[in-house]
Image (cartoon, rainbow, N blue to C red):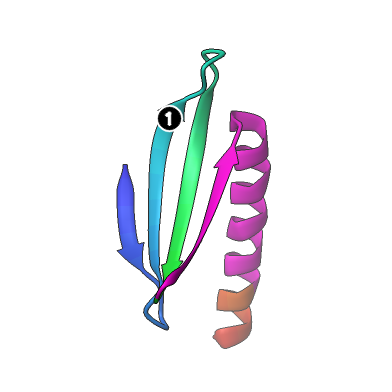
């Protein structure tokens, strides 16, 4: 779906996958050199996490003004 680089060189990749049960999941892969982390989130968890990230980013941007 989407891939981008974080400020310190980490590669972040977002993919939609379909679980064997038919549930759509968001797979988040973070690569940092030879290490990587993989998370699979259901829609409700991805929504909750996304909203928390947006709130944080908005507050951080306000403090930087």
Q: Name the residue under label 1.
A: 17
Q: In this view, does 57 lie to the left or right of 32?
A: right
Q: In this view of the protein, which residue sits in the foreground, 12 or 47?
A: 12
Task: Give the residue drawn at x 65%, y 49%.
Answer: 49
Q: Residue at x 46, y 62 (%)?
A: 30
Tell me what residue is drawn at x 67 percent, y 38 percent: 45
Give the answer, above or below, for where 17 lies relative to 32.
above
Residue 48: image location, x then y, percent: 68, 43
**Looking at the picture, does residue 14 appear above or below residue 35?**
above
Q: Does the magenta stretch include residue 42?
A: yes
Against 45, residue 38 (above or below) is below
Residue bounds of the magenta highlight: 34-59
Residue 1 spot, x, y in % from top left: 31, 41
Circle 1 — which element? Answer: strand
The reply to whether the magenta stretch includes residue 55 is yes
* Residue closer to the observer: 19 or 43: 19
Q: Quadrant of residue 18?
A: top left
Residue at (52% x, 31% y) in the render: 25
On the image, the x and y values in percent for residue 42 come to 61, 31
């Amino acid at each position: 779906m989407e891939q981008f680089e974080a400020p310190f060189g980490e590669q972040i990749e977002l993919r939609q996958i379909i679980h064997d049960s038919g549930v759509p999941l968001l797979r988040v892969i973070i690569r940092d050199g030879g290490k990587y982390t993989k998370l699979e989130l259901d829609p409700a968890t991805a929504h909750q996490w996304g909203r928390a990230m947006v709130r944080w980013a908005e507050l951080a941007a306000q403090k930087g003004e």
